Amino acid sequence: MKYVFFSTILKMLPIILLVPLGFILKKLKFIKKESIEDIKKLVINIALPCLIYIGFYKLNFQRKFLVLILTISLVNILMLFIGKLIGKVFNIQNPYFPLLFSSFEVGMMGYSMFTAIYGDNELGKFAIMDLGQTFFIFFIWMPLLMSKSDKKKNIKDTLKNFFTSPIVIAIFLGIITSLISSESLYNSKIFLSLFDVINKLGSLTVPLITIIIGYELEINSSYIKLPIITIVCRMTLLIFFSLAINKYIIYSMLDLPKIYENALFTMFILPPSFTAPLFIKDDNEENRCYIVNTLSIGILLSIVVFIFSMIF
């Protein structure tokens, strides 16, 4: 037990140390907010897509993964409806409450957590789970979120954003490359050099993301009850769903290795998507406070639950 505990803590050190470092850098005003936004662009558009590409390149894509992709999309839709139902039953007026019941912050948090424990070689297993929610995010969650802020988006814009997303491009390029069986290509000096560059860029993801997470942690104690209710209810339901899916779909139906169960559990304990605050009306401080508090509490709880799940 002691060995497992210390082994887990050592693997999680990049997150355990760098998240507080990001928070300290913010308090010391060592890094400006504008600089953090530039670093996020670097991560989302270059480092993270490189990491995802490597994950899918090393993955042997199988048709039965489509079941997982569909299942995760359906869970997101179900969580959206559950959020609406709970909101009606308990008369929760905040319009963002149902939306924060669904979606997962895979890009800016999930990949770094999973990679910290399981390494780059297993990242493709986690990326499969991300593919399941990517369709939901672009075609359901984002349009609903934007409708709350009166920012409408037509299907043409949605499709354009989907197919031009660096992360989506990285996913498909990784799948295509993994399906090409050409030893002459993979052993060529040009490919090996290019792959080395991609690998080095991908290695920037974990340290940069964890610093960003710590920098953006923000909890307003005057408005904390609803965010706590949101995260606790959300995580309780999703842990239940992850256990059921792991037992009846991943293990019994698809007969996939244990690592896929770990990948699903990791995803389902993540906080909602970090893009939510970007579409709040500027004059609505209450909604902004609710979303930021919910995400910050979700970050802290996710890290704690993830560490304990590795130990026990």
Image (cartoon, helix red, strand yellow):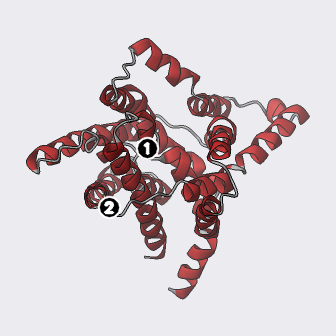
Q: Residue furthest bottom?
A: 2
Residue lying furthest front? 283
Residue 146 visible in the displayed image: yes
Instruction: Give the total number of marks visible in the rendering.
Output: 2
Residue sitting nearer the eye, 46 or 199 = 46
Depicted 83 relative to depicted 210: above or below:
above
Residue 263 point in image, percent of width and height: 47, 54
Q: Quadrant of residue 75?
A: top left
Mark identifier at residue 222: 2
Asked if 244 appears above or below 174 in the picture, the reply is below
Q: In front: 188, or 199? A: 199
The quadrant of the picture occupied by the C terminus is bottom left
On residue 67, the disc is none
Mark 2 or mark 1, which has the lower sequence index? 2
Residue 74 at x, y = what percent?
Answer: 30, 38
Location of mark 1 (residue): 273
The kind of secondary structure element at disc 1 is loop
Residue positioned most to the left: 89
Secondary element at tag 2: loop
Going 53% across and 80% down the picture, which residue do you hit?
A: 5
Q: Residues within 10 Å of mark 1 (few under 14, many from 20)?
A: many
> What amino acid does circle 1 point to?
Ser
Q: Label 2: few (<14), some or many (≥20) within 10 Å?
A: few
